[in-house]
Amino acid sequence: MKSKIQFKLAAYSDAAGKYNPQAYNNGNEDCFYVDDNLSDNQSNHFVPDQIINLSDCGMLMAVADGMGGMNAGEVASAIAIKTVEDFFAPGKVAPSMAADKKQRQQYLETLIVEADKRIKDDEIANPEHSNMGSTIILAWMVGTEITISWCGDSRAYRFNPKTGIEPLSEDHSYVQDLVRKGILTYRDTFGHPQGNIVTRSLGDPSGPARPETRHFNVFQDDIILLCSDGLSGVIYDKADKYESGQPVSLYNLQDIIANNTESMTYCRQALFDAAQKSDWYDNVTAILCQITGSPNIMPQKDESKTATPKINMADSENNLQNAVTQSVFVIPKKKIRYAFAVLLAFIIGGGVVWYWLSGRNGEQIMPTDEPEGIMEQPSDSNPALQKTDSDSIIVEEIDEEKIGNEEKPRGENRIGKSGKPNTIANQNATAAKTHDEPAENKPDTTISEQKSNTPGLTLIEGSHEAGITPSDSTSSNNSLK
């Protein structure tokens, strides 16, 4: 018989940063629901830190956050949780349906759409509740799986000692849309002036609710956290530091949970204490579920995200040799692209140099049989003034035996100090002077080598500047919390 999961729970909700003794429920617009056994005859029931065997129908957790910027937010969240209670009343869920994740997803999404409809119906019946709304997030654990469905910015996390903390949901909010587009960072979302704008919610007048669902495996020592943004909006997921090395925040979810795994009640209290010390400004709700027994063992972080090569264990010597070979010859793709770019640059540069040298040799003047002097040429075809395709002047060459030890600086025949080619008039004057002088007064040296002026090659990667594109998050249908 396959072993079943064991778990223990803790849950709490507080008006926190919105405490108001004159308001309904002291100003707390959050609601939550926990049922540790969907197979029994009790609903919305749990005992803190009591170890429970997971039933065939599973267990359920839900958080609803009434919209702070709307009228009667506490009414909207209460309607959402009442819809949850109705859908999961005793006898409503069969084990066969609970065991199928596709049916679980359909059932949870139908629940969310129904909660949205009930909130809108209440608005029609009670005009004083106009424009109220709520977020919702649900987690249904069955067997060794958990299904998360949500609408809005209430969150689900998983913490495991081997892998740390990770979000299981993604906010339906304006700032999260900017993070997804790369315009904002996670750190930028804290204290953002538009941080209270949600792009999906229950009660949204623009249309029916649009829930999102994800499925996950559950592992030994997992701690599942469901919370409203009153907690996740003031405490970072993980420790973070500024460029100066100073910590961004004194508290983070990962460290708090890691230091309080013995009791979910103490862990929940530590989270609330940290939120209060972080200047909480909203209602705070948190549900914690710790997996104390599971047939599934969480893989190490590097094993779960990186595929390691398989090594033959039959021969330890071959095993070591294979490991070394793999470590030597596995080259990252970025380095391959860099090496290819360098090789391409060498090929292009070599081609340019070859083309220049070929053109120069093709126009070079052949040496004469005369021992001294320069071959007489008609003035209109003097090879001393020949121009190449690159506008460089080829100066005629003297037999190598007549070249003296003195060498004229390279490039002065065609490049001035300004780096630009000399004028044709200057070149003609230089040529005329060469033919007017007697051969015996001429210096023994003539420039037979020209300096290459081939420009270097630069590879420029294309750049793309991300623009801010309007999304549904900026529409008039977005909800303020």
Image: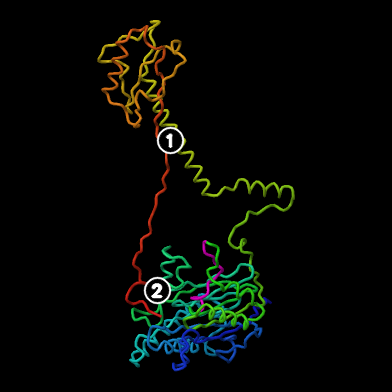
Against 322, residue 55 (above or below) is: below
Q: Does the magenta stretch include residue 325?
A: no
> Mark 2 is on which residue type?
Pro
Magenta portion: prevailing SS class = loop
Mark nearer the N terminus (1 vs 2)? 2
Magenta stretch in the rendered image: 231-243
Residue at the image point whose x is 59% and y is 89% from the top: 40
The crowding category of the residue bearing disc 1, from other C-alpha atoms within 10 Å (few below 14, some 14 to 19, many at least 20), is few
Q: Give the number of the mark in front: 1 or 2.
A: 2
Residues 91 and 377: in front is: 377
For label 1, the residue is 348
Q: Where is residue 364 in the image (x, y as percent from the top left)?
A: 37, 18
For label 2, the residue is 193
**Label drawn at residue 385:** none
Residue at the image point whose x is 37% and y is 87% from the top: 71
Residues 18 and 56: in front is: 18
Residues 34 and 349: in front is: 349
Q: Quadrant of the C terminus?
A: bottom left
